[in-house]
Amino acid sequence: MLKTIAIVLAGLVAVYFGVLGVLYAAGYRVYRVPTFSMIPTIEKDERVFGRLSESYRNRVQRFDLVIYTSSHAPGQIYAKRVIGLPHERIKIDQNGVVIDGQKLSLPNAVSPAGLGLKPCDLVIPDDSVFILGDHTENSADSRYLGPVPKENLIGYLLFKK
């Protein structure tokens, strides 16, 4: 009886690590978000499940939650929301976000309270996206650091752990 239980447990462990290995090989990872910038969507130090994908850079969409690196903090991985896409003119102030002359309806998770803290008006380069933290009062995002080059996008978030 004990031998049978040991064999079953060993089999379950092997399956568990086999599945994890396949997911890892396919680019799925768990990330820790080190900042307050995505509250309430993601809490500081919360773990999230994402997927590495270079091909994703070519199909990024507005409001996607992306995983990216920043030249301002090499080696650190961040998560933010894509607000603006290549070639769009984006204007942000206390009244909200305007893209190509049209007011953008932001997701409920994005706090409009901090938008006026750092107004901006620019055209997003063809190789970049404009990112914004949901906690706009405390987010080092594209308003402060400029658009993020697509080559810095390493993947996208699937869900929280």
Image (cartoon, rainbow, N blue to C red):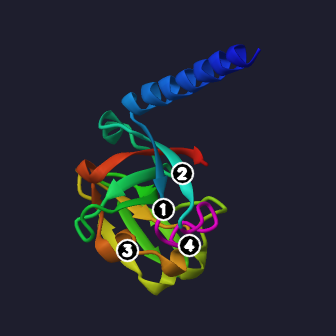
Whether residue 84 is visible to the viewer of this picture, yes or no, is yes
> Which residue position holds label 1?
33
The amino acid at mark 3 is Arg
In the displayed structure, 83 sits above or below 27; it is below
In the displayed structure, 56 sits above or below 91; it is above
Which residue is drawn at the image coordinates 27% and 53% (left, top)? Answer: 152
> Which residue position holds label 2?
48
Of labels 3 and 4, earlier in sequence is 4
In the displayed structure, 58 sits above or below 114; it is above
Are the two marked residues, 3 and 4, in contact with CB atoms closer than 8 angstroms? no
Q: Is residue 18 left or right of residue 8?
A: left
**Label 3 to label 1: alpha-carbon separation:** 20 Å
Q: Residue 107: give x, y in percent of width and height.
A: 62, 58
Q: Is residue 122 left or right of residue 13?
A: left
The amino acid at mark 2 is Val
**Label 4 to label 2: alpha-carbon separation:** 17 Å
* Most foreground residue, 75 or 158: 75
**Label 2 to label 3: alpha-carbon separation:** 24 Å
Q: Residue 54: give x, y in percent of width and height.
A: 29, 37
The amino acid at mark 4 is His
